[in-house]
Structures are given as structure tokens and as C-alpha cells.
Amino acid sequence: MSLVFDHVTLGQRVLFGSGKAAENVAAEVARLGASRVMVISSEFEMPMAREVAADLEVALWHDEVVMHVPVDVAERARAAAAGAGIDLIVSVGGGSTTGLAKAVALTTGVPIVAVPTTYAGSEATNVWGLTEGARKTTGVDDRVLPATVVYDAALTLSLPVEMSVASGLNGLAHCVDSLWGPRADPINAAMAAEGIRALAAGLPAIAADPQGLEGREQALYGAYLAAVSFASAGSGMHHKICHVLGGTFNLPHAQTHATVLPYVLAFNAPSAPEAAARIAAAFGTTDALEGLQALRDRLDAPRALADYGFTEDGIAEAVQVALPAIPANNPRPVTAAGLTALLRAALVGDDPKILTDELD
């Protein structure tokens, strides 16, 4: 069979090196010719950001970072950037920090140098997200793609194992969704499979040795591949569900993705045998779901949405909002009944295999 596909590779520089963040950020700011730098980081991570930006003359430090990027928070950051005449943003932090930098770039076109401290992967995509009135809106715009990503595994050493696991499984969800996203193609699939392999190797190493760099380097590498494949393939069923759970119910981003992933995989895998085989091979197992669940068991991963504040009362609204957003090319037809069953299982942490057996 001949191959026919349309693939877009996003233009971005990646600098990867443990202990090199300050050096690489300074070099990139100089290369990009910036003179008015805004550093965005959460209040908690601002001391780390000051170390990363130690060799820069910073015009504006901004630490109002909120999960899911509420519109009013974004507007204040935009106003601050405009008032300071900013010509480059350095973001140091996780997905919420990168997301706020993207919100500023979306309306100003100011370039971003992103320095991730988690495995969220937002730094490698041209996808933005904003939340207003309990609804999370996402979009695609090349203005929000960071010009450069500076990866430094040493910056992730302070990320607790529990959060590292949730964040890494969020990255793994990017890989899985990339295999049946609306623009899935063989290049995305190859990167996604290598991302799964790297994350499946890196996350247990982090759990075994939280202060070791090797596992964290593998996880960062895997998270990058996951994000690149996801940016190309587009948002599939898993992400459409999780965006609703986050934006409408304010559930924590990484833990929500980590919890929902096995249920979406169980739902779709029987109708996507090639994708399932690729996932299984990346885990080194014969079955995709068994490979994922073995990793999750090893990591003591998040298991139930109820643990993060979701309730039975929210399921109907979540189904109503998420169902129309799920791409038409999802491998298995998605009905209100099917999505309700999926969310009910994820709510209490039921065995995901029931979705394979029982859903129409």
C-alpha cells in the first residue's frame, strides 16, 4: 500500500542540556536580538527563574500564573507587557506558565523562549488555551509557538515524584492521542511511539531515584516528542474530554490527563488495531492497555477523578460540552451513553477493561 499524507513540521529551536539553562537562555536572547525581556514564572518557581535569567537584564518579572489561564489573568499580563515595551518573553515553569506566555504572544506577536520545568509539553506546540466563564477555549496560532525551547533536566529535580508521574502521564497522553488525532500521520506515529518508550523508561527511573538526572532527561525527551507529535496530529478524544474537565470543573491538568488516559485507550484500542499495536510495542508488551496499566501500577498513578473534586453530578454537563468537540475521525463512534459510561468509570477508578467489553 502506498503512503499518502500531509505533514507539517513546526519551526523551532531546541537546546537540551542539564545544567545549561542560564547559559542557553542568555545565548538565545542575544541571538534573537531582544532588549526588553519579560520573565514569566509562578511565585513558587520565581527563585528558579531568577537563576535561569541571571545573565539577563530583565525589564519585567511577572508571577501571576493561574491554572488553565483565566482570561482576566491573561489580560493583566498583556497589559503589563505592553506597558513595559516587552520584545521577548522567557517563561520558566510548567504548562500554566507556558500557557500564560502564549496568551501574551497571541495578541502581541512577541517571541517566547520557553524553559519547561515539567513534562507538560506545551512549549513544543502552537496550541493556546484560555478559560472564561467555566469554559476552556483552545486554538492554534503559530504566534504562540515558542521560538526556542531550553530543556534542562536539573530544573525538574524539585518536582516531586507524584507530580512528575502525573505530568509524565500527561505527556504520554499526547502520544496516545496523536495516533488517532484529526491529522494523524506516520511521522506523528513514529515520534509518538518513541515518546511512549522514553516516558515509560524515564518515569520509573524518576520514582526510583528522584535526584537522578538520567530518568528526568528521558522524561523531558519523551515529553518533547509527545508534544511535537500532538501539535501535528491535533487534539483527539482524550484531550477534548480533559479540556472540559479542566476548564468547566477546574480539575488539575496533569492529574486529570493521567486519570482519564486508560479509559480512552480502552475505549478506542479495539477499533484502532494499528495504533494499539504500536502502543503495545512501545511499552514492550503484547497489549496496549496492559502495557499502560502495568506502568501506572508501577508508578502508583492517579486513579479516580473523584479524588480531584469531580462528582457524579458533573457527568451530564461534561458529556454535553465534550461530545460535540470530539473529532469525527475518532476510531470508535462516540455516543452520549458511551461517554457517560467512560466518565462514570473514570470517576471512581473502575477497571478500564469494562469499556472495551460493554460500550456500543
Image (tube, rainbow, N blue to C red):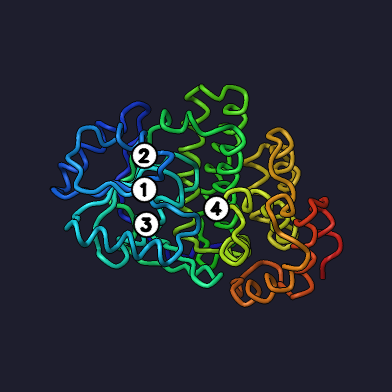
* Residue sitting at x 34%, y 55%: 101
Nearest-to-viewer mark from 1 and 4: 1
| Residue 101 in view of the camera | yes
Disc 4/disc 3 C-alpha distance (Å): 16 Å
Mark 1 or 2, nearer chain start: 2
Disc 3/disc 2 C-alpha distance (Å): 32 Å
Q: x%, y% of residue 187?
A: 47, 54
| Labels 1 and 3 touching (C-beta < 8 A) | no
Q: Secondary structure at mark 1?
A: loop
Q: x%, y% of residue 130?
A: 45, 65
* Residue sitting at x 57%, y 53%: 253
Quarter of the rendering containing residue 301: top right
Residue 46: which disc? 2
Report whether 239 appears left or right of 57: right
Mark 4 or 2, nearer chain start: 2
Quarter of the rendering containing residue 320: bottom right
Disc 1/disc 4 C-alpha distance (Å): 27 Å
Q: Disc 3 marks which residue?
A: 9
The type of residue carrying mark 3 is: Thr
From the viewer's side, name the closer residue of 38 and 116. Answer: 38
The type of residue carrying mark 4 is: His
